[in-house]
Image (cartoon, rainbow, N blue to C red):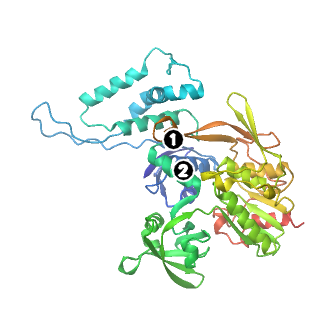
Amino acid sequence: MKLYFSVSPVPTEDHRETLLAVVTDTVPGSTARFSEDGKRLALEVPSQSDRFAVLDAVTFRIKAFGYTVTEEPRQDPPAPPITNFGSFYQEKQPRTVRLSTFLITLISVALAVSVLGVLLGSALSGVFGFRHGDTLGVDGTEDYSEKIGLIDTIFRDYALYDTNGDLLLDSMLKAYVEATGDQYAAYYTAAEFAELMTQNSGSLVGVGITVIESVDPKGIAIIGVVPNSPADQAGVKPGDVIVSIGSGENAFSVAERGYEASLNALRGDEGSVAHFKVVRETESLDFSISRAKVETLSVTGKVSETNAAIGIVSISQFATNTPVQFKNEMDRLIGLGCTKFVFDVRNNPGGDLKSIVAVLSYFLNENDLVVTIVQKDGTSESEYVKAVTYEGTYADCSVAKEDIGKYRNYAKAVLINGYTASAAELFSAVLRDYQLATLVGTTTYGKGVLQNIFDLSVFGYSGGLKLTTGYYNPPSGENYDGKGVAPHGAETPLDDAVKDKNPALLSEAQDNQIAAAIAAITQ
């Protein structure tokens, strides 16, 4: 899938290289390039990627560097000229087309609003209190539902090319959501929504590794291995770098094929076998591993290389399975003798509300305030620490009474940066407000608004909708949207020599922010 963006202001040539590295690091498996004048950015991502998640991530990362990106609609190539001028009435040439940019710009927003009213009006009226007869439009002078029917009839009767009704409707709904100005909102088709739910549940089909691009050696760096996954059982370890994929005459080098194509080759159906070679320090190892359903790994931990009493716990996101992984990793490190902890939430984009409440419950007392959510109408709802049991998707977010406050008395530091966002910022702010941890690093991104996901199947329709529905405030009551959460004391940026590298690729000796966090809890 290819996406195109306009970039403002136009970055200098030096900055372009930095932005390209940031974008490809943000979207694993992607390739990016600037136009010669630097005004446009072309991004190619794996075909199964969630387009709106990619847009959110790219916008989020580049904004931190002072640039604004706007997606540009991709134009279909023009139709070939008609060279046979036989009968005036000719059979339509079958072709599936998207709405033109003109059509999307001028009418999609208004039409999609009406479509939502027509499709969801009766179902939503009883749920959300919509009034029968509400007119969606600029001044109510036109019946847009009839206008949609008219335009559809014109296209069906006179357009040279056949149109795909589902594609047109999906395009209108996406255009409507985009035009609301809610940068975090998205409309998902049925397939996209299913993929979103799978990602949020923390499960996938694969061998069970978390990876990023490696430059030296050129390849795919493994930064995490899911416990008890096929990769773990086969002996794959964090730090291994995949340098070739395939077996026998079908094997190819990652350096020659490229990161994106190689990453796609690692994917496959459940039960199929992944063949690859890794470099581990000075040796090469070959693996043949059957793919299976595995949980994604959002929590990893290790004992500090400089102080055996300190555990370093990295949280990459707050998925629904994060609380259980976090608890297991904490208990493992405590069993190894760790009595102080650094929680690394750098580059953590956030996640699920129930997940973050569950994780914070391990540090707080029963009935402590975790977060207050303020809705559009000014009403608010607060979440407090309590024992709770969930079933199904949220089973791993359950909190046992005996686990409340389990890790409260350990010395703690939280490592943050400009890409720490949303639920990860709440994690940092709550521990700060209760004076349970020292924040180290640089000021966070500043996303203090909450999104709700609506499954349209409950109304009888396919797909899903995500939109911003309110603010969420930490216990202090001070919302950090647009401002971020600042560290205690002076900011500690990464040293210049490693500032452009992903922290996950840094050794402890290279990572001055880790050193600062350790110093904060050992003084």
- Is residue 154 depicted above or below 523 in this figure? above
Which mark sits nearer the N-terminus, 1 or 2? 2
Q: Quadrant of residue 256?
A: bottom left
Q: Amino acid at mark 2?
A: Met
Q: Which residue is tagged 2?
A: 197
Residue 471 image offset from top left, x and y in percent = 70, 37
Observer-nearest residue: 471 or 5? 471
- Left or right: residue 275 versus residue 283 is left
Residue at the extreme right: 523
Give the number of callouts.
2
Q: Residue at x 44, y 64 (%)?
A: 264
Residue 232 seen by the camera: yes
**Residue most extreme to the left:** 86
Question: Where's residue 334, x and y in %?
Answer: 79, 70
Name the residue furthest top: 141
Residue placed under numbered mark 1 in the picture: 464
Asked if marks 1 and 2 touch (Cβ < 8 Å), the reply is yes
The CA span between labels 1 and 2 is 10 Å
Q: Secondary structure at mark 2?
A: helix
Q: Is residue 305 left or right of residue 75?
A: right
In the depicted structure, whether residue 143 falls above or below residue 235: above
Residue type, label 1: Gly
SS state under label 1: strand
Percent of width and height locating residue 189:
45, 43
Q: Which part of the image, by quadrant, shows the C terminus?
A: bottom right
Q: Which mark is residue 49?
A: none
Horizontal side of 263 relative to 420 (left or right) equals left
Crowd around label 2: few <14 · some 14–19 · many ≥20 (10 Å):
some
Vertical placement of 139 versus 188: above or below? Answer: above
- Identify which residue is drawn at 23% across, 34% down: 160
Res 21 seen here: no
Q: Quadrant of residue 146?
A: top left
